[in-house]
Image (cartoon, rainbow, N blue to C red):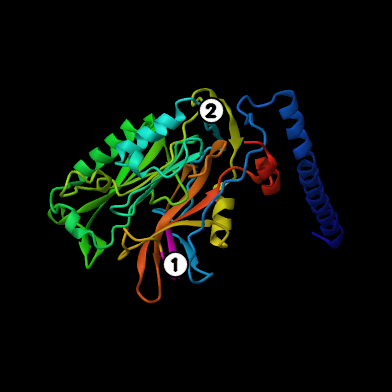
Amino acid sequence: MNLVQTSVVFKRVLFGVSAIAAAYILVLVLMAPVKLLILTINPPKDLPTTLFGKLDAPEFQYKRITNSDPQYILNTKNGRLPTDFPNKMPVFRLRQPLFSYEAGKNAQRTGAILGYYDDSFKTQTTDPIYTWVDTDFNGRLDVNVKTKEIKLDLPLFGKTDFYVTGKLTQESAVDQARNMLITANRFSDLYYTGTTKVYLGKYVGGEIHAVNFEHETQLARVDFFRRFINFPIYGPDPYKGLLHVWVGLPKDTRYKQLLFPKVEAYQWELVDKEQDQNATYPIIPISLAWQEVAQHKGVIAGIMARDGNPFEPYVPIRVDKILINSIYIAYYDTPKLQRYLQPIYVFEGNYTTVGGGAGQLTVYYPAISGDYILPVEEASATPK
């Protein structure tokens, strides 16, 4: 082949390559408007409905750690992100409290169930929160008349002589806590399909420490978690239920207030779980959520140290390396009544520290696209 023929072949090849490149660029340019035109003419039948408009931003609570730069490592079984998440999820309305003439009587009935009666009642019957103070053990019970929240705290330090040892089992603790909540009308149907976590404890030097054996047990902590369809419902701390009850067996049965020394109950019910299945919202890709979490933009919601005490408040610790073992979708609820129950991504795993510390750790990240979330200032101005 001479130079003239080579030049002709080269020009033809160059022309072909240029034509292919131009066609590719044209396809890229036209792809978006063509897709839009197709969607306009024949829209998908399963587009998110966004029936409730923009939603309030989830009100997370961060577990503080003593360092700011832990390393996140994806440690799932196949070393990859899940690929089976949907592209939209339903959002559910939460029932808002209505005026009731019986609200005050119901609050007083709740007090009696927990061992608090008229002789320890400290507020007026017209107050929004009823308060009882027990002079025998310095316990305090608050019941929100409107929302039915329960907050009961009885100091337990040094009260080992008041509790029976070895008679409280995991099963009996759950039964007593559940029956109390059912009697007080604080146990919705979603708890029957949910999960329960029990910690057993005994007194050591005046304080309560976790034990593994029922024959040592004096007190138990019981946490109830709801589940809806295949999705768990978590509060700000995934290791603490929105129904949270401590159970003990007092030696003197006259001291009924010692039976449930600590209670937190936030009972929020769905308005219409069947109808609200149609109120769907787009969720962000899991790859984007993981990218944000790996850059420390997730919410460290739960930390349970391997040698920690579930009967003591959380104290900030150092976290150096976080291994994310599983990722799934849950619904998020809070002790403060919100308008909607909305989905979140849950990143669950373990942590380690350079000093040898280790334990469980859970990170939350909002699942719904920020395009459908109200700015904080707008949400606070929206009537609840």
Left or right of 76 in this view: 261? left
Q: Secondary structure at mark 2?
A: loop
Residue drawn at (35%, 38%) of the image: 118
For mark 1, what is the residue?
316
Q: Earlier in the sequence, mark 1 or mark 2?
A: 2
- Residue 128 x %, y %: 51, 38
275 and 45: which is toward the camera: 275
Q: Position of residue 233 (x, y in %)?
A: 44, 41
Q: Position of residue 99 (x, y in %)?
A: 53, 27
Establish if 155 lies above or below 50.
Answer: below
* Residue 312 picture quarter: bottom left
Question: Is residue 96 positioned above or below 330 on the image?
Answer: above
Q: Relative to 78, does residue 126 appear above or below in the rendering?
A: above
| Badge 2 amino acid | Leu
Structural crowding at the residue carrying mark 1, measured as other residues with C-alpha within 10 Å and reported as few (<14), some (14–19) or many (≥20): few
- Marker disc for residue 98: 2
Label 1, secondary structure: give it.
Answer: loop
Q: Is residue 109 magenta?
A: no
- The region drawn magenta spans 315-325
Q: Specify whether 379 is left or right of 127.
A: right
Front-most of residues 39 and 28: 39
Residue at figure coordinates x 51%, y 39% from the top left: 127
Rendered residue at 57%/46% (across/down): 58
Relative placement, left or right, of 26 versus 130 is right
Q: Quadrant of the C terminus?
A: top right
Q: Residue furthest right?
A: 4
Which residue is more in the foreground, 154 or 77?
154
Distance between the alpha carbons at the discs numbered 1 and 2: 39 Å
- The three-letter amino acid code for the residue at tag 1 is Pro
**What is the quadrant of the N terminus in the image?**
bottom right
Q: Are marks 1 and 2 in contact (CB under 8 Å)?
A: no
